[in-house]
Image: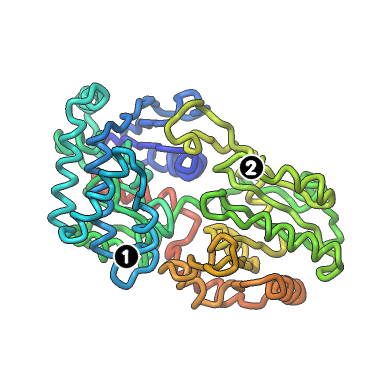
Amino acid sequence: MKKLGVIITDGVGYRNFILSDFISEAHKNFDEVVILSFLPKSVYKDIDCKVIELESVTEKFFNWFFRKAKEVAHLQLHKKGNFGIQDNLKTNYSKSNSSHGYATRMIFKFTHFFHSENTIQLFNRLQQLSFKNNSITKNYKSLLESEKFDLLFFTHQRPPFIAPLVYQAEKQNIKTATFIFSWDNLASKGRMAANFNYFLVWSDLMKSELLQFYSSVKSDNVAVVGTPQFESYVLDRYKTDVTSFVKKFDLDSNKKTICFSCGDISTSRNDELYITTIADAILNNQIKDVSLLIRTSPAEDPIRFQNFVAKYPFVKWNYPKWELSRENHQEQWSQRIPTVEDVQDLRAVLEFSDININMLSTMSLDFMQFNKPVINTVFGNSTNRLYDDQRFLNYAHIQKVVKSGATKVVLNENELITAINSYLNDSNLDCTNRKQLLQLQVSKPLLGTGKRIAETLLKWS
């Protein structure tokens, strides 16, 4: 008898592993599948398995201190020759006069000299010890003793609130596996929340990055499986037709559709400028015979764009239908849950739009799944008083996009308008480069991703 525990941490994990084929494939491979959820139990409708809602441990000072020390030491260890990690290290520094600010500066001074893998592992052990007496951590102990899992599968490797659960799994010798959440997590982000026994990755590239940044990980414990993030694009239940797409978003079927996909305000602060540039170019006939559809980020309330609705009445909007499942959570964005309708909407937007424009987002890869041309807007730099989004061009995962020639990276208004018109004239431009970049970033076919993941987890259980 094999029993799998699937840990869902947020709305994106819900979309990737609940709304894909993964759960049904897990049922075919395991005798029992249990969902352990940091989302409310009520969001799991029509799910044919047991769901246990987990309460998350709220970090106290020493929990935070050792986690921060672990993350900063990891960044210090790998900063040489890696601009993304250097940039993240700078972001982590604090000038605050609070206790956390003083502690952060002390951590930076210490880890400047001491940041070996052994030091990182020491901080990891101290972090675990810091929450071992927490009442919620003790509840995890009882839960794992009761359920007797063969394998715990963490669908995201970074949220700090999963660390106590991993700690209890280690104490009970329960195997753990995790999925590397996003294409940028290894090459520019901080340390994982905990140590795991096994790792699922998108691509051969991601496997090489994992082995580079985590020297204690063995190659045999890493499996390339692709990503369920895109699996819904090949599942018939999410497919719609072009007529429904045009009607839903009130588009003109005689015009081509440009989709601008927004990021969240933390990293995509120039989106308002990019929308203004495109909309004004349409009004001035610099871009002709197109509809402009804007999809806002599901991670935030689209209120920052409300003035644009009145200013540009011809612009159409796609507000992602992600429902907030819980108020007053420490990471509120994580509690937004995608609806089936939104998965269908997103697939339609990807399939039937003619061009995508975004600020170096993973949405570039989403549109490329349907061989759609992509333009990446980065107008801001260190001298022009805009938010400096051009610095992201130096991140390792973005440099691969730039060098691939799969997208047109534009630095100003004229370049953006020129790029749009060139793709409107010939959508096959850069087609080969797009296919090559997809193969680099997602090394397995979309169809069968859930099956591939479930079979790999069974092998490890």
Asked whether the viewer can see residue 116, the reply is no
Q: Residue 82: name its quadrant.
A: bottom left
**Residue at 16% over, 50% down:** 121
Task: Give the quarter of the figure containing the N terminus.
Answer: top left
Question: Tag 2: residue type?
Answer: Pro
Q: Which mark is residue 409?
A: none
Q: Which mark is residue 209?
A: 1
Q: Is residue 242 placed above or below 2 in the rendered structure? A: below
**Residue at 36% over, 31% down:** 36
Residue 38: image x %, image y %? 40, 31
Q: Is residue 124 placed above or below 225 in the rendered structure? A: above
Q: Tell me: 233 left or right of 90.
A: right
Pointer 2 local density, CA inside 10 Å: few below 14, some 14–19, many at least 20? many
Residue 15: image x %, image y %? 51, 42
Residue 58: image x %, image y %? 33, 30
In front here: 138 or 445?
138
In front here: 77 or 455?
77
Q: Tell me: 102 left or right of 438.
A: left
Pointer 1 local density, CA inside 10 Å: few below 14, some 14–19, many at least 20? some
**Residue at 82% over, 63% down:** 282
In front here: 17 or 160?
160
Q: Residue 67: name its quadrant.
A: top left
Q: Which mark is residue 320?
A: 2
Dot 2 falls on a residue whose secondary structure is loop
**Residue at 45% over, 70% down:** 394
Question: Tag 1: residue type?
Answer: Glu
Q: Residue 73: name its quadrant.
A: bottom left
- Marks 2/1: CA–CA distance: 32 Å
Asked whether the viewer can see residue 413, the reply is yes
Q: How is the image coloured?
A: rainbow
Residue 14: image x %, image y %? 47, 39
